[in-house]
Image: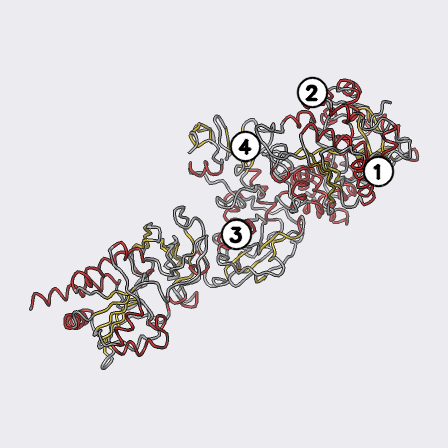
Amino acid sequence: MGKTVKYKLNGIEREAEEGRLVIEAAKDAGIEIPHYCYHKALGNPGNCRMCIVEVAGAPKPQVSCRTSVREGLDVKTDSDLVKRAQASALELHLVNHPLDCPVCDQSGECGLQDYYMKIGQYQSAVREDKEHKGKRIVAGPHVMLDQERCVLCTRCTRFVDNVTKTHELGIFGMGHSEKIEVTPGMTLDNAYSGNVVDICPVGALTDRDFRYKVRVWYLDKTDSVCPGCARGCSISVHTNTARPWHNDGKRVARLKPRYNPDVNGHWICDDGRYGFGNLDTDRLGKVLRLKPQKAEMTWFDMSKDISAMLTESSGAISVVASGMLSNEDWAAYKALFVDTLKVSGHYFSAEPDQLGEEDALLRRKEKVPNLKGAEALGLKSGSFDDLAADLEAGKIKTLFVIERDLSEVWGDRAASLLAKARTTILQGPNKYSLGDDFTYRLPATAYVEEDGHFTNFEGKLGAYKKALAPIGDARPDWAIFALLQKALAAKAVAA
Amino acid sequence: MTKILTVHFDDPKLHELETYRRLGGYEALKKALGMERKALQEEVVKSNLRGLGGAGFPVGFKWSTVPPEDKVPGPRYVVVNCDESEPGCYKDRVLVTRAPHQLLEGLLIASYVIGAKDSFIFIRGEYQNQYDILEKAVAEAEKAGLLGDVRIHLMRGAGAYISGLDTALLETMEGKKAWPRQPPPFPTVAGLMGKPTVVNNVETLSMLPFIVREGGEAFAKIGCAKNGGTVLFSVSGHVEKEGVYEVPMGTKLRDVLALAGGVKGGKKLKCVIPGGTSMPPLLEKDLDICLDFDAIRAAGTFLGAGGMIVLDETVDAVEVAHNIERFLAHESCGQCTPCREGSNWSERILERILEGKGQAGDTENLARVGENITGKVICALGDTVGMVTRAYITKFPDDFKKRVPNHG
C-alpha cells in the first residue's frame, strides 16, 4: 500500500492511496464513471474517452483511467462539462452502431444501452447511413463476432495478447474502417476464449452457446464455485426458470466468472464455462432398488434396507467417491464410512479418469473441485487397480459408488468388475453409463441444487449457493449419508 | 534576409560530403565533440530553438528531460522524424535532398549530447529518393570516420500519416500499429523500446551545426522572443512562385507571401493555411501576423510544420473543409472513438452538403461535433479534426450559407 493522501471528489474531501487511478478511487467512493476500454486486469489504453473527468488546473478534460490520485487533486465527475463530454463520447460511439438491440444477446447488459439510459442525449443527430461491417463471423468454437457492434475498445485483443498470449484477435484496417478480426490462419480456440464475451462491453462478441437462447433479464444469478477442476473458480450460475420454454428447457443458461482476486481473478476457462451440459441430462430423481426387480422406494425404506446390508457386509465394504463432494459431504462421509462402519477401502483419487490438461493460468490437472476437502479430514484414497483386484478376488461384498462413472475408471472391464460385488449402490446426480447395473440407485443433488463449500488445491475455501430446486427426490450427499447413519444408529439401538 | 539552413543551397553538389566539408561542414561536430555535453545543451537552451516538426516545443528543455545516465543507465536514442506527411509540407524533403550532411551533422551533435550510440532516421516510405540520398550520405560519413561510435540506422515508414507524431512513430519503429501513446511517460523518459528517446524533426536537427558554430545567443538573435533562428515555409497553392522559403522566426505573413510572389494572377486572397492542412486558416486581415509559434497561436492557429497553402478567392471553403476532413478521416488511426467516428461523420456531413443535400442544422451539428472531438482525444490529429470544421464554418459563413439552408 502506498501512502494515503487527501483529494477532492465532486467537492467532497476523500482519502485514497496515492497513485490509485481516479476511476478506481471513485468506484471505491461509490461513483461509477462510465467506461468501455478500461479493465482492471487489461490496462487503461484510454481510447474510449468515456471516463472523462474535470481536473482542476488541467487545461482540458482528463480521462480518469489515466489520472492518478495525488495529494490535493480536485476532480469532478458530475460537472456540466463532464456530462457533456461523456454524452458526446457516447454519441460518437453510436454514430455507426447498428441499433439491433432487439436481436442482440447483449441487450440488457450492454454498456451502450446502460450509458445511453444514464447519460445519453436521446435525440439522434445522425442523418448519415450506418457503416456496414461483418455481422456473423464465427471467431471460434465458442464465440461469434459482430464487427458492426464493436466499439473498438480493444479489451478482447488485449486479452488474447496479454492474458492468454495467443493473439487470435487483432485490430485490422485504419480509422473508421478499422475492425476486430480473427488473425488470418487462426481461430479463437484457446482454452479461455469465452472470457472475451464477458469483457466485451457491447454485443460484438457473443457466446455461441448462449446465442438467442434466453433474454438476460429473465435470468437469475447465484454465486457458485466451478466444480470443473481443483482451482475452484468463483462463478455465477445464471438460471432460467422464469420462462422454462426458453433455452431449450434447460435450467442453467450459462456460467459466468465471478471476480475473486484470491482464486481466479476475472477469468474462467472454457472447460468450466461450457461444462454444464450434463446438469439436466440423465438425472436421477427417484430412490430405486433395481435388483432383483426394479422398485421405487421411500428414503426411509431405502435407509433401512441399505443400513441392514451395510451392517451385514461389515469388513467387506469399499467406497468409490470423487472430489465432487463438498466439505459438508466429506464430513458426513467420514462420520458414516470411517467412524461408524470402519470402512478401510476408500477410492476417490483423481487418477485415472479425472485428470486433464493444466496450464499456468487457471486450469488444474485434477478435474474435480474438492480433493482437498477429503485430505483435510485425513481420508486417503487407495488405487483403483487395487480395488479392481479386490473385486476380482471376491473380497468385496458391498460397493458404494458416489458421483463417479466406473466405466470411465475401468473402461470395458467396469461392468464385469461391478458384477463381482454382491450389492452395489450408486449415489449421485447422474445415471452415468452403468446406472442400470447397480442394486440401488440414490438420487443426489447437483452442486447447483445445494449449498456447500469446496476447498481448492491451495486450501482456499469457496462457498456455493443453491441456484435451483433439486430434481425429484434428490437430496444432498451429506443428507443421504446422515440418513444412513441415523438408520444404522436406530438399528444398533434395536439390536 | 538571414538564412541558416539554405545558405549554400545554390551549390548543386551540396549533398556530397566533399562539397559540404569544403563549405565548412562537420566543423561544428568537431567543435561539439571537444565541448562538455552540459555546455552544449545550455547553448541549445540559450538558442531558443523550437521543435520545427510542428509542436514548437523548446528543444533544450526537451533534451533536459532525458534522465541522466547515472539515474537511468542503459541505452538512449535519438530519432529523426522525417515522416513528413502533412499535406502542404515538403521542407524536410528539400532539406534531405539538398543537404543530407547538414542533418547528419546535427544528428551526431544531438547524439553526443544525449549520449546515444544508436540513432535512427525514420523516413516517410514515399520518400524513396531521399532514402537513397540519406543512405549514401550515411555511408560517406561512415567511410570518412565522422560517425565515431554512433551507428545511424535508417527506417522507412509504411505510409501512415499518424506515424509523423512522435509516439506513433516510436510504435511504428517497434513494428506495431501506429497508434499514438498517451504520455506520461514522455518519450524522453520511456521512448523507443522503453528507453529514453529524443525525437526531433529534420529541420530542428539541421539547425544544430549553426548553433554550435555561432553560439546559442547568435541563433536566438536571428529570431524573435522565445523563437530562435529561422524557419522554413513550404509555400504552395495560388502563389506565383511555390517553393521552400527560409525566413527568420517572427517574419510577417505578408512578407512570406511577397517572397512567393503574391497571389497568383493578381487574384484576391481567400485565406492562407499557415502550417499544413490541419491548421485553421488565416484571412487577408491577418497578413500582419508575425509567424512564430507564440504569435500565431494567439491568432488562433498554429505554425505547424510550415506547410503554407495559399488559396485565392475562387476557392469554396466547403470544398476545402471537406477535402481536409476526408484526409483526416482517412488517416485517423482509429484508436480513440471521438476521432475515429467523428472525423468520418464530419466528412460525410460535408460530403452530403457538397452533393446539394445540406439540411437545416447541418452546420451547427458539424460545429458541435467538432467541439466534441477537440480536446477530448488522445493526439493532435484528433484535435485538428474538430478544429478544421469549426474554423471554416466560422471564417467562411457565406460559403456554407450558399449550400446549407438556414445556415445561421
Front residue of this view, candidates B46 and A317: A317
The reply to whether the C-beta atoms of the residues labelled 4 and 3 are less than 8 Å apart is no
x and y percentages locating residue A312 in the rendered image: 14, 73
The span from disc 2 to disc 4 (Cα, nearest Å) is 41 Å
- Give the residue at mark 3: A200
Residue drawn where x is 77% and y is 42% of the image: B318
Where is mark 2, residue-wise? B39
Picture quadrant where residue A274 is located: bottom left
Distance of mark 4 from mark 3, alpha carbons?
27 Å
- Nearer-the-camera pick, A66 or B152: B152
Relative placement, left or right, of B126 versus A419 is right
Across and down, in percent, residue B12 comes to 91, 35
Chain under callout 4: A
Q: Chain of mark 2?
A: B
Q: Amino acid at mark 2?
A: Ala
Going from the N terminus, do you reach mark 1 or mark 2 first? 2
In the rendered image, the vertical position of residue B401 relative to residue B214, given as above or below: below
Q: Which residue position holds label 4?
A: A54
Residue bearing mark 1: B97
Disc on the earlier residue, 4 or 3: 4
Of residues B316 and A8, the one drawn nearer to the viewer in this rendering: A8
Q: CA distance from mark 1 to mark 3?
A: 49 Å
Q: Do labels 1 and 4 touch, CB within 8 Å?
A: no
Quadrant where the image shows the C terminus of chain B: top right
Q: Chain of mark 1?
A: B
Tag 3, which secondary structure? loop
| Side (left or right) of B383 relative to A231 | right
Residue B90 sits in quarter: top right
Quadrant where the N terminus of chain B is found in the figure: top right
Say if mark 1 contacts mark 3, CB within 8 Å. Answer: no
